[in-house]
Amino acid sequence: MKPLEESIAPGEVAATQASYPTAREFAANRFAYFLLVLAVTSVLGFGLIYLASSYHQQFAEAGKDNADLVHALSQQAEDSLTQIEVLSIGILERIEVDGVDQFQRPRMNRLFKSQVLAMPQLAGLFVYGRSGEWLSTDKDTYPPSANNADREYFKYHQAHPDDQGLHLGPVIRSRSTGDLVIPVSRRINGPDGAFAGVFLATLRVDYFIRFYNEFLSNGNTVVVLALADGTVLTRAPFMASAVGQSLASGEIFSRHLPVATSGTVMVPSVLDKVDKLFSYQLNPRYPLFMSVGVTKSSLMQPWYTEAAIAVAVILILLLCLAYCGKALLRQIRYVMQAESSLQAAHVALQKVATQDALTGLFNRRHLDTILPIEMSRSRRNGRPLGLIMIDIDYFKRFNDLYGHVEGDRCLTEVGAAVMNSMRRPGDIAVRYGGEELLVLLPDTDPAGTYQIATRIHRAIHQLNIHHAASPSQRVTASLGWSILAPQDQATTDKKFVMAADEALYQAKGAGRDRIFPALTDMA
């Protein structure tokens, strides 16, 4: 018998040896497949984690943006009512001292007219006698047989002698102009304390609608202003059928508001039944409720785009891994390089995210990060911290008159003027929102802060930008500033900014184009 080797041709032996890999090759292939599976599993896992994390982050950021907007809009509504409350105190004192039947009506008419011109939110000012008859108003003519004894606010003050504060009523249609207005009223007492009439200020509904529309970037965002009992005062985008409706049956009023006076929740809208991410706030000073809602589809649109890009990247990585299975080391090296590139891009995006694209100044997000740090450094180093709020006067009129392109150019030039007015690298200029700018001045005392504010004010004047809709015929700005003393441990970053913001409102209320300091007590 022939040996086994002799029974097989040499070519057949070679073929047999090629058909069966060695143990080492088998182990290497198995290890390679194991690494390939591990890599694929890792890519899928990290991709899912990233998508889930970015999904929750998108909700968190949207909720914060909504909450900030609600706070700002609630503050604006509160400021509008505060102006009326201050005005009403002086009016009531004059009427109650002179007597309802004795005060000088022509003089009151002139006063009312000047106040309506000075306060854009006002539709009219009125004084009614004890029977509802019209005693004085800012109007030149009265409706025939005018009497307002049937109005809700008039009946309320008749029935509530102990309520001497402001009363906010549901929206009504003005008998003098035919416009939708929000009545804000106070009771007038006679010398004996008996009911002697009503002082009424009416707020323009369309004023709030125009103001809110400036914050609506698309049709999927809704702003609602209501009374504390849920009665809708106005809505933007405006929907006439919504005015006067009640939100009391909705989830926010029935479930969330009794627990917290402010918050952010995903609930269906009472008005259109669409699920929205709502941020809400019950005003602590006046019976007002403010909410901002964004539809879920609109809210998640940026995430859908980001997710599509992420999925595309994951698929490309998987295809590359499958195609280059025998070169895993090279592929791993490629993935690490890609990851490094993504991290660098993320760092670059973070830098871009802190800048305002129009003016080149820092944006609000960067301020939210840096302000607590600077406040802590001020307290730690025992050095004061200055803050200046800047608002371009009559900027909406400028946009309306010259268009948004010129408005953007104006904002850019004012931002450059602010930047050029600062002298130290550590000073920070921020576009706070719209036409409002903010300057943060570390290690700066009141004298230095006022000096910088004056320099900014002068620099804006020197731009000499023509503004036909401004009383001064050129672009000007109002400034308010505040100081954080290093020994002040109680003031929060919000109160610090609010102090300067209130000073800014005082500057605007005093006629604009001026600089006002904040009150020293910010606690």
Image (cartoon, rainbow, N blue to C red):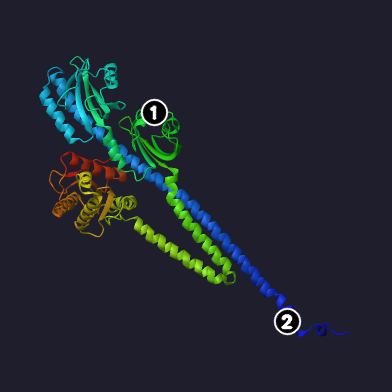
Amino acid at circle 2: Ala
Dot 2 and dot 1 residues touching (CB under 8 Å)? no
Residue 64 rendering spot, x and y as whole percentages? 38, 45
The mark that comes first in sequence, 2 or 1, is 2
Identify the image quadrant of the C terminus: top left
**Can residue 519 be seen?**
no
From the image, tell me which residue sits under label 2.
14
Q: Is residue 230 above or below residue 37?
A: above
Q: From this view, report whether residue 499 is shown above or below residue 409.
A: above
Q: Left or right of 240: which side holds 420?
A: left
* Residue 119 found in image quarter: top left
Q: Position of residue 135 (x, y in %)?
A: 16, 20
The amino acid type found where label 1 is placed reads: Ser
Q: SS class of the residue under badge 2? A: helix
Name the residue located 60 percent from the left edge and 63 percent from the top edge.
37
Name the residue at 31% across, 46% down: 493
**Residue behind mark 1:** 246
Would residue 85 appear left or right of 368 to someone viewing this image?
A: left
Q: Nearer the viewer, residue 255 or 219?
A: 219
Spot occupied by residue 84 in the image (x, y as percentages of width and height): 22, 31
- Which quadrant of the rendered structure holds the N terminus? bottom right
Give the residue drawn at x 18%, y 42%.
507
